[in-house]
Image (tube, rainbow, N blue to C red):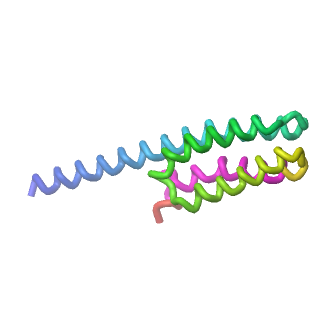
Amino acid sequence: MVKAILYTLAAALLCLGLFVFTEWFVVKQFGDFSEAVETLYEKVENKTANREDGFAVRTLWNDRKEKLQIFLPHNDISYIDYWLSEACGLIYYSRYEEALGKLEVLKEISKNLPGAYSIRLENIF
């Protein structure tokens, strides 16, 4: 009986540790990406962004994406891929006004998506 209780507590602590690590990792990855999107947004707003700026953010995202695929559904990752590709394409053709709308969506996604996987009561029930 005592062994069963100890095993149950050990499993619960292990799960809790995994959940805390997952939340920390996802928030950290999106923090870096969010800063890059914010910088790109400012460059587009000032109409100084070029193809290389968009490519740098895409490269950063691809690096983050490989690690995040373990923790996030592929649909969420594809959603970011879609909006980032749209924004980069518009930047390439110097269509800055339209790119701002796409980047605004990316800013909101990178701000809100990590919260959907945090340890909060509304995410548990």
Q: Is residue 121 left or right of residue 109?
A: left
Task: Residue at 55%, 42% (x, y): give it.
Answer: 64
**Location of residue 53 with respect to 69 vertically, above or below:** above
Instruction: Identify which residue, 5 or 27, lies in the foreground.
Output: 27
Count how many numbered circles sit on residues in the image: 0
In the picture, the quarter occupied by the N terminus is bottom left
Looking at the rendering, the stretch of residues picked out in magenta corresponds to: 100-121
Residue 125 at what x, y percent from top left? 47, 66
Instruction: Identify which residue, 35 or 61, lies in the foreground.
Output: 61
Residue 85 at what x, y percent from top left? 72, 52
Secondary structure character of the magenta stretch overall: helix
Choose top left, top right, bottom left or bottom right for residue 32: top right
Q: Is residue 59 left or right of residue 69?
A: right
Kindly give the residue lying farthest to the bottom in the view shown.
Answer: 125
Residue 72 at what x, y percent from top left? 51, 55
Task: Residue at 85%, 40% (x, y): give it.
Answer: 44
**Location of residue 15 with respect to 36 vertically, above or below:** below
Residue 17 at what x, y percent from top left? 35, 44
Task: Residue at 87%, 47% (x, y): give it.
Answer: 93
Instruction: Identify which residue, 22 or 73, lies in the foreground.
Output: 73
Q: Is residue 50 left or right of residue 123?
A: right
Task: Residue at 64%, 52% (x, y): give it.
Answer: 112
